[in-house]
Every structure is written in structure tokens, then in C-alpha cells.
Amino acid sequence: MPEQTTSPKITGEPVETAAGEVKSDAAVVRDALGVGVAVGLSGFAFGVTSAGSGLSLLQTCLLSLLVFTGASQFALVGALAAGGNPYTAAAGAFFLGVRNAFYGLRLSQLLALPRALRPLAAQWVIDETTAVTLAQPTRRAARIGFTVTGITLYVLWNLTTLLGALGAEALGDTDSWGLDAASPAVFLALLAPMLRSTTERITAALAVLLALGLLPVLPAGVPVLLSALAAPAVLFLMGRRNGSPDDTPAMAATPTEDGR
């Protein structure tokens, strides 16, 4: 999810933060635990929502154990609950999860883990671990942040998923609690600060408009897939604008807000 316009310089030596202080291991652990605990507890909402959507206890727990990416999990059970085609629901969840592959490309450079550990670490490459890792000034801090966030979040997410699925019957109508909005709310809270440029904000807004506009007329799960068209559409229009023959040399030399 998160993406920085400028990445921190990762080295093996302590680096001073913007405040002029070297970030200690304890500070990294504290920050990682904060993110892991806050987001991990929302697994309860997924467990309740999944059980309320008709999935069994085993299916719900396997989704958290094997998929372990909240946005994709909520997209899948939400589409199924709305009566969507299982293949369409799975496709929507898959494309939401594709972003993690791009995170992995960046994190593999920052963490420089041994080859034997990379397949295991790949399971923890998600929005939250990426955000914590990219915020660290040194490779050591990045590794600590990634590991602590990953362990904390994976354990808590799966534990609370189980508790949520078991407690779904006691809660009754899960829709009335609005628990399905918990994970998307966390997702947006992490994403919003990263939308720094005009291009990023326009793309996000267009994606939202596409999804909301298509929701009443297309099967569940399809609007999410088609909202991805916002990115190439904005890039195409930006390219046409920047390459317009009407642009003056002075305009062409002026950098845009996103630095391009």
C-alpha cells in the first residue's frame, strides 16, 4: 500500500533521524508493535464478517493463515456475501493482493535477507510491514521493524480471526455492527498520508468514482477490478498533457508536483 516518493538510505550503520537522534532498537520495536497490535485486532472483524457471509470456521481460518492480506480477504467474503460469482470474487481478491508483489521487489533490496528466508518472509509482505520497514533509517532497523510487525500481526490476525468466527453467532446480525468496515478503514488510514502528489490523488479519486459508479450495475467484485483502470487512464492523460505541442518551453521546464 504505502509508497514513498523518496526512499530512506539503508545502510548497516546507525543513521540519525530527522530529529537528529539515532533510532534505537527499542524504538523500532515499539513502533512495530503498535502497528501490529492495532491492525492485528481487526482480524476479529474479518472472522465475524466471514462467518456471517456463510464461510465455515475452517475456511475462515485458512484464509487468514494462507492469504494473510486483509483487503483481499474482505473483498473476497464481501463479494461472496453479495451473491457474486466465486471466480469473480477470487479475481478481485487476487488483483488487490498483486500490490504485495511490488512491495516485495523493494523490500528484497532493503532487507537483503538470505535466500533460504525469503520464501518465509514473503508471507509477511503486506501493507503494514512495508510501511514500517520503509520508515527505518538503517538495514538493521528495517529488519527488526519487518520481523516484529510481521510476527505480531500474523499471530494476532489469525487468533482474532478464530475468535471472531467463533463469536459470530453470539453477535447476531453482523451487518448491523459494521465490522466489515474495520479493515478498509485501517487500509485507508495507512494509504491516505502516502497520496502526496496530485497524480496520486487524482488516480485514487477516479478509482473510487469508478467503483461506486459501477457498483449498482455490475456483479459484486467486478467494480473493484475495473477501478484499476484509473491508473492507466490518468497516466495516459498526464502523458498527453505533458507532450502537448501547445506547451511552452517554460512550462515544460517546470517540474510537476510529483517531481516529473
Image (cartoon, grey):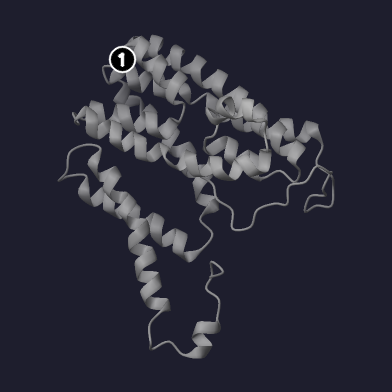
Residue at (47, 65) in percent of width and height: 198
- Amino acid at dot 1: Gly
Residue at (82, 48) in percent of width and height: 15
Q: Residues within 10 Å of mark 1 (few under 14, many from 20)?
A: few
In this figure, which residue is indicated by the disc labeled 1? 172
Residue at (56, 69) in percent of width and height: 259
Q: Is residue 113 left or right of residue 96?
A: right
Locate residue 171, reporting x and y percent: 35, 15
Towards the viewer: 98 or 201? 98
Task: Give the SS element for disc 1.
Answer: loop
Residue at (40, 9) in percent of width and height: 166
> Which picture quadrant has residue 22?
top right
> Which picture quadrant has residue 97?
top left
Q: Is residue 9 left or right of residue 90?
A: right
Locate residue 201, reporting x and y percent: 44, 59
> Which picture quadrant has residue 209?
bottom left
Q: Is residue 255 left or right of residue 51?
A: right
Locate residue 120, reporting x and y percent: 57, 24
